[in-house]
Amino acid sequence: MNWQWFHRLGSPRWFYEKTSRWSPWLAIVTFVLLAIGVAWGLGFTPLDSKQGNSFRIIYIHVPAAFLALAGYYVMAIAGAVGLIWKMKLSYMVMKNAAPIGAVLTFISLATGAIWGKPTWGTWWVWDARITSMLILFFLYLGVMALQGAYQSRDLGNKSAAILSLVGTINIPIIYKSVDWWFTLHQPATLKLTGPSSIDPSMAYPLIIMIVGFYCLYAWLLMFWTRLEILDQEQKTKWVKELLLGQR
């Protein structure tokens, strides 16, 4: 089997050159989706019969939570590829996925607290879903800390990759926490395998926001990885030529 295509994917130069074409278009798509989703969700969806306007935070909270979980898998898979195939690019992706995931997790926790105050009467409870999300936040911070804790970049990358892989056990716990334990946090209202419990007039802008957040995540990861490539590959001939050409 010819694995040339796979190793080409791990080339920082190949990634940088290809994403130069994709990045502007992805940014446009991201902006359009988020603009439509925010305007539709915040301005035109009807009031919730029980929560009134406070439910509208769902259009930020749910997409951020989705991407916090999915982004952890991206980070862990990148770490695994780095450990197994020794690809520099995968470690760069892992490094930049960590702070993006941490910010999304923080947004999810913060918006959840804001939503919880009028709904539950408190900003915070040690609920199974909320607590496991807090652990996710600390895992992201741990990966970031390990990468900078060693003088050897390679050792830091390997340590961070191992932690990211160990931490994947927390993701299914987050997903299933509302089913496994008694919890204040409501079960999923938007489902792929069964009927959703959210009205279509509220669901459509939510779906648009989720897709927009996925595009935003991809664009941010692409952008910061491109900067990381320029930083780590600055002594290579192709980067020197690239920087000279931009002057």
Image (cartoon, helix red, strand yellow):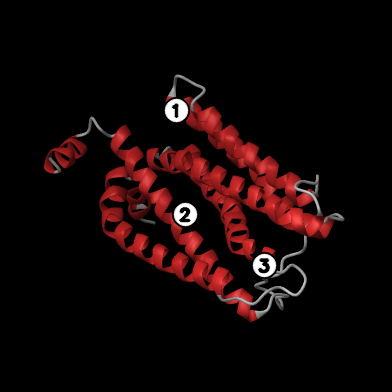
Instruction: State the CA–CA distance, disc 1 to disc 3.
Output: 49 Å
Is residue 190 visible in the rendered structure shown here?
A: yes
- Of circles 2 and 3, the one toward us is 3
Query: Which residue is rendered at x = 35% and y = 64% of the image?
Result: 28
Q: Is residue 232 above or below residue 120?
A: above
The amino acid at mark 1 is: Asp
Q: Secondary structure at mark 3?
A: helix
Q: Residue 118's spot in the image, x, y percent?
A: 76, 57
Q: Residue 122's spot in the image, x, y percent?
A: 79, 49
Is residue 162 visible in the rendered structure shown here?
A: no
Query: Which residue is rendered at x = 75% and y = 75% of the image?
Result: 49
* 73 sits to left or right of 233: right
Q: Which residue is mark 1?
A: 154
Q: Which residue is mark 3?
A: 53
Assign the C terminus to one quadrant of the image. Answer: top left
Q: Answer few, some or many: residues within 10 Å of disc 1's Cα (few below 14, many 20 plus, some between 14 and 19).
A: some
The numbered mark, 1 or 2, whose residue comes first in the sequence reads 1
Assign the N terminus to one quadrant of the image. Answer: bottom left
- Of circles 1 and 3, the one toward us is 3
Quarter holding residue 226: top left
The amino acid at mark 2 is: Tyr
Q: Secondary structure at mark 1?
A: helix
The numbered mark, 2 or 3, whose residue comes first in the sequence reads 3
Count of labels in the image? 3
Q: Which mark is residue 217?
A: 2
The amino acid at mark 3 is: Asn
Q: Nearer the viewer, residue 165 or 139?
A: 139
Q: Residue 12's spot in the image, x, y percent?
A: 31, 43
